[in-house]
Image (cartoon, rainbow, N blue to C red):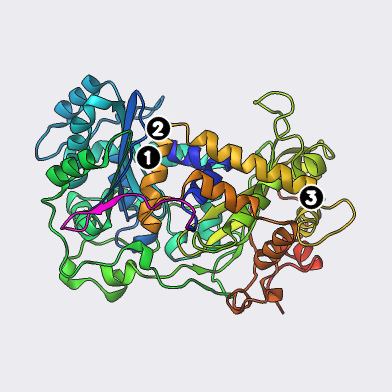
Amino acid sequence: MLRALLRRSSPRLSLRRSLSTAASSTLAPELKVTTLANGVRVASDPTPGHFVAAGVYVDAGSRYESSRTAGAGHMVDRLGFKVRHSGCPRGDPGSTTNRTADEMTKQIEQLGGQFISSSSRETIMYQATTYTHSLPSVISILSDTVLNPLILPEELDAQREAALWEVGEIKNKPEMILPELLHETAFHGNTLGNPLLCPEDRLETMTPEVIKDYLAMWYKPERIVVAAAGVEHEQLVELAERHFGSAKASQPLASSSRQILGSSSSSNPSINPSQPFSTSAPSPAAVLPSSSLAPEESFEYLSTAPSRYTGGQLLLDKPDLEFTHIYVGFEGLSIHDEDIYALATLQVLLGGGGSFSAGGPGKGMYSRLYTSVLNQHYSVDFCSAFHHVYLDSGLFGLQISVHPSFVYQTPNLIAQQLDSITRPMRGGIDEADLRRARNQLKSSLAMALESRMVQVEDLGRQVQVHGRKVSMPEMAALIDRVTLSDLFRVANRVLRPSTSPLLADRKKSGRPTIVAQGNLEGMPDVEAALKRRGFGAAE
């Protein structure tokens, strides 16, 4: 989980994950996807190489958790393939009905590959890379971990300790915890706002029975994708049939996360503007038999519940921090929206980064936020655009870290930068900026796919979301079609939805999500600064 959060903090990785699962066209031939009799989908990329990568992707994650199961996905993730971090308690793989934890560790080490597991809001994944001839052993280990975990009390106790350490580490790192607080504020009390980490007061209630109930509810064959890169399709289907074919399907086949109902917005969130960060569950946990579950805790409800964007504000005054961190976000677009490539191009155009470039001189120096913010205001330590994309919603906005002495100017600076991407203006974005952003986005995607692990994750997630793979040439063609007018249009769809010609956009509240942490003394009203530029909920 710690690795997953670190990876998600990278804007380019976020872009790659967003666009690799974006809407498809008809330019590329259909990928071979075989569905086993029990509903497991099998997809392969035969591109040859010295190594093979394989993964199992489950339609599960924190958005599907209820108050009773909050944090279960995080604990399931921790019971998968974990490495040890400095200072972190043990992170060995869990025992299964066919292998003890020691046997699992020994077999993984003998394969000489890399095994990882991670959970997110909409998927839990198990991945591995190893030598091509070891694929049968890899699929066997993956299936055993996914389908046959024992969830031994002593192993769960060890992972509780590790999870507690993990939560403590993340809470002390603004760059890691603030994106989580942004989601919890933006989708307050529902789906995408559910905590990604197990709430501290839930750790002791995470019993083997609770974990097993969670797995029984979500680890259904029809919600599983098995994918591999560097292997022929027929070989992978044979291995998947051998190791996943015996899993019993639901009767009738249950709906997957791709059938989530339309999202909605709310302009009246009930959130305390100054509530400090807490990893407490929304309500006390209790272990209940499945027959006595409330309707809102049932599979039928949770698997189709639409996200509900609320917006809101969360201010955390911590004067001891070196910098003041501010996030301003708006409800974005879903992964299925036709404008998703235009919005991703806009994020790259805004770009940004830190006052010190670890990548060497010139890295990102022509992006909008670099030239207009970082190079102009030396009290700004970091400024970047973010873009989170999900099945039925998203978040788009800016994050900035400044010296406390500059905080009084920051809200107006954020509003100014957002306004500059909504219309033509002197000193605004132009065709040269657009060409640069399109090229950077295409190269970022292409270079990311050079990694075998990224390649198989891209394949598995695309099949999970769309049932097919969008090829790199397709994505490049869609990016090349983005025009300057498209950027202005999509910026207004997100930042000023009441002005959109689309009825679905006009139904959105337009309310911003504001999260700030640090020395907040002297910081003006961020929402008021946005309203002066025409952003925010309509009166």
Whether 402 is among the magenta residues is no
Magenta-tinted stretch: 26-40
The amino acid type of the residue labelled 3 equals: Glu
Q: Mark 1 or 3 closer to N-term? A: 3
Q: In this view, does 404 lie above or below 24?
A: above
Q: Which of marks 3 and 2 is in front?
A: 3
**Badge 1, how many Cα within 10 Å: few under 14, some, many 20+?**
many
Q: Mark 3 points at which residue?
A: 431
Q: Position of residue 235 (x, y in %)?
A: 21, 38
Marks 1/3: CA–CA distance: 35 Å
Which amino acid lies under the numbered mark 2 shown in the image of this protein?
Answer: Arg
Task: Give me the residue at 50% from left, 42% from top.
Answer: 8
Describe residue 262's horizontal placement relative to residue 316 as left or right.
left
Relative to 354, residue 460 above or below: below
Residue 225 position in % (x across, y down): 29, 50
Instruction: Give the Cα distance between marks 1 and 2.
Output: 6 Å
Judged left or right of residue 43, residue 319 is right
In contact (CB < 8 Å): disc 1 and disc 3:
no
Residue name at image x 82 percent, y 44 percent = 372
* Residue 472 in the image, given as x and y percentages of width and height: 51, 44
Query: Which structural element holds mark 3?
Result: helix
As drawn, which residue projects farthest toward the right? 426
Front position among marks 1 and 3: 3
Q: Are marks 1 and 2 in contact (CB under 8 Å)?
A: yes
Q: Callout 3: few (<14), some (14-19), or many (20+) C-alpha neighbours within 10 Å?
A: few
Tell me the tag on residue 452: 2
